[in-house]
Image (tube, grey):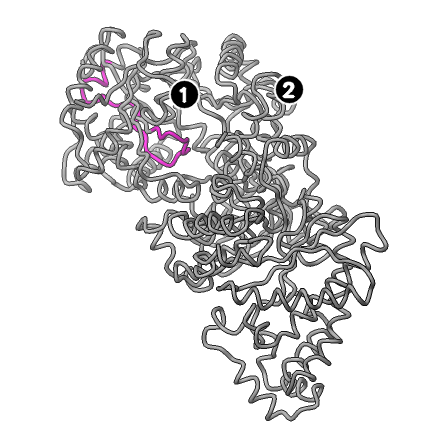
Amino acid sequence: MSKYVYKFYNNNAEGGAKQKDLLGSKGANLAEMSNLGLPIPPGFTISTEASNYFFDNNQTLPNSLKQEVKKAIGELEKNLSKNFGDPKNPLLFSVRSGARESMPGMMDSILNLGLNDETVYGLEKFTSNKRFALDSYRRFIQMYGDIVLNIEHQRFEAVIDNRKRIVNKEEDRDLDEEDFEWIINAYKNTIERFSGEKFPQDPEIQLTNAISSVFNSWMNPRAQTYRKINNIPDTWGTGVTVQSMVFGNLNDNSGTGVAFTRNPSNGDKVLFGEYLINAQGEDVVAGLRTPFPITKEKEKKGKSLEEKMPDIYSEIEEMSKKLEDHYKDMQDIEFTIENGKLFLLQTREGKRSAEASIRIAVDMVEEKLINKKTALLRVKSSDIDNLLHPTIKPGSKKKLFGKGLNASPGAAKGVIAFSAESAEELSAKGLSVILVREETSPEDIQGMFSSRGIITTKGGMTSHAAVVARGMGRPCIVGAEELSIDNEKYTLSSKESTIEEGEYITIDGTTGEIFLGDLETIDTEPIDQYKTIMDWADEYRRLEIRANAETLLDTEKAINFGAEGIGLCRTEHMFFEGERIIFMREMIMAENKQGRKKALSKILEFQREDFIQLFNTLEGKPITVRFLDPPMHEFLPSGDIELKEVAESSGISFGYAKEKSIKLGESNPMLGHRGVRLAISYPEIYKMQARAVFEALIETNKKNKFSTNLEIMIPLVATGKELSIIKEDIQNTCKKVERENKTEIDYKLGTMIELPSAALRASEISEYADFFSYGTNDLTQTTLGLSRDDSGKFLDDYINENIFTNDPFASIDIEAVGKLVEIATKEGLKGNKKLKIGICGEHGGDPESIKFFEKIKLDYVSCSPYRIPIARLSAAQASIEQG
């Protein structure tokens, strides 16, 4: 029989930190902290196996679970000298979710479980505080109605608001005991009215229903959205932690808070966090009250926990160091102070900004807490990407609109939206969006993801908005209390001005400043620790990293980011600039070979000069030049006015130009007359390109000390015969250029594998090739029969139905496309043992795809310039993980 319940208390926990798969992150860490002897409210964890059983069996709990829970409660009752459901001395529980990877606020929790019309007075007797006991009961009924019975949260808020209005109208005072008794009765009536059943007085029924509801929250929309964004599988399931209650809202000698062992925004090695006096656990992260800092601050003198409760602060400081030293990572700790006694409710790896992630990883190596390999594995590829977030261009004319707390760094600009739904709609129209809310909640997750930046007028540095934005890498400003939102008029106001939804603002998450208008942003200079991480990545990676680039700007950017050469230089991009397009169109309209050659001779000069500049910039680094790939019609204008201009410049009639344009049009150009097929029909095109690149090579090598490493790539090859014909043409051109210049030319010839036929005929093709480069963008299209341009209309449906786990154009489909790559690699090496093999599709910058390319031992990956740092880190991580 399966075991589903694991206890933790009195230095005697079942399980530990290494069992996150079974117990979830919260349960595993509570067991670990219990074994460390830290002050943990005792309890037990229901495993993720129970969660998976629940969903595999029509949302029913395992038969044996009830007995296991009953046994665990019995042990807790003995340990705490309290009894579950006892009217005189009640044992109360919090019931919380806990997946193996932290999903802050995405699932549900229920506090004060076990209260009813009788036990509430036992709580009153134990605490000598009737108002507190009634308020706790009121909170529990509201949570139960909301989470278990799915009654809208606003219905309960309407009850309490109504009572406050009556009280304020009559006496202008805070709610007292009589008011809470009235609210409790009104809440019970609300539950019976909207659910058709009475609020359950039996604590065992409360607990069973709460456990089921927390399991169900694993599949709520916000949790599913969060998992989709963060690539967390649905099959992981969640644990449920049932823990004895401690009360931070008991009195003014009580409180609750969150502490980070290091600053999660910049990585500084200082205790960082916020707290509230006389508050319950959810109050700090909910952002409904503005919390105070844990440590002393000049701006808030006398309000910190360090000043208010110095002994408690010292305890937190000591325990924080113990936990960080034990886990060897920055920790996010939730704590409650009950009448002067400290309890730790949770620890987990703290979510941090990109800057903090990299700085902490490097600092911990220098502190000898971790080694370089661990540091590299700890930094996420998204951290590297987010670190390169833009900043506001220096010298910009800025008009300050407001200021808040700098919760997540980076600059972002966009139109303001006041709801998650509005943010999604505006983003879908192609607009950059800044989401503005009083505070965010887990329901806002999709709107936050759709936005470039986030502002909240309430909340602190550990609020939901701050934590989630840091995890997403979104610039975020919280606690901008001087700003006012009018949700009826859709306006945002400061002391001096008002703006409407749809107007542009620019935010600086590094300083917490909000500016009016659309300010220019620029890329930032990375922190020193970024270079250290990149150096370590280069030390451990095996894969060579190249860039997809053809302009000088992109090439320089790629080299600055650490590219070791160009893996894809698309020459067709060189044909569209200035008067080149005119000569290209003359070539297309030519009536015969001689006419085409005449036009191509004019293009030759431009091509040669382009290559000379690229070769000089690369200074000997390898470059793979892909010869012309797109079909001819892509170079022609679509309108008759421009086509008339083409006819005049080419010396032909408009009628002839129109007829030729129609003939060149293709119904399926991706599989049409392009790539190598053009060269078979019009060999003079590739011969011109070969001459241009060879002459540029000679010119560059003559003037420089370095020797250019040239690779020529032929696209869209499907058979060995095609490549053999083109290879002979290029060899003959090479010999001519060598004779004319009385020199020898060193180059390699290869092909892009982008058709299933080419992958399956790899052994045959490799006889004529020095290298293969997988064009996985088109290989994905031709293998899966998906159009990259059109599949977006239905890909989400396929991912939601688990037909695809990811977008196959973002991360390689290993089962189909990956198998072809693997087959072609093995077969290609059979035909040519010296064959060099790489990949130049955008999958070359995807961390998950890079793991696969490392596994099958490709030689290099090539990706767009801005993804070079990600590729460098991911290649190192793949090498370390695979040994």
* Residue lying at 46% horizontally and 73% vertically, measured from the top left: 668
Q: Give the Cα separation between the discs numbered 2 and 1.
A: 28 Å
Q: Is residue 880 left or right of residue 188?
A: right
The residue stretch that appears in magenta: 98-122
Residue 734 included in the magenta stretch of the image: no
Residue nearer the viewer, 376 or 698: 698
Q: Position of residue 666 (x, y in %)?
A: 49, 77
Is residue 637 visible to the viewer in this orientation of the structure? yes
Q: Position of residue 16 (x, y in %)?
A: 37, 17
Residue nearer the viewer, 182 or 82: 82
Residue nearer the viewer, 40 or 381: 381
Q: Residues within 10 Å of mark 2 (few under 14, many from 20)?
A: few
Q: Residues within 10 Å of mark 1 (few under 14, many from 20)?
A: many
Residue 116 included in the magenta stretch of the image: yes
The extreme right residue here reads: 703
Q: Is residue 25 left or right of residue 571?
A: left
Which quadrant of the figure has residue 124? Answer: top left
Residue nearer the viewer, 578 or 211: 578
* Residue lying at 68% horizontally and 34% vertically, measured from the top left: 531
Q: Mark 1: which secondary structure? A: strand
Q: Position of residue 185 (x, y in %)?
A: 21, 30
Residue type at tag 2: Glu
Q: Which residue is mark 2?
A: 366
Q: Position of residue 379 (x, y in %)?
A: 55, 32
Q: Mark 2: which secondary structure? A: helix
Which quadrant of the figure has residue 53? Answer: top left
Label 2 or label 1, whichever lies nearer to me, is 2
Q: Is residue 290 left or right of residue 63?
A: right
Q: Earlier in the sequence, mark 2 or mark 1?
A: 1
Q: Which residue is mark 1?
A: 346
* Residue lying at 55% horizontally and 58% vertically, measured from the top left: 752
Which quadrant of the figure has residue 268? Answer: top right
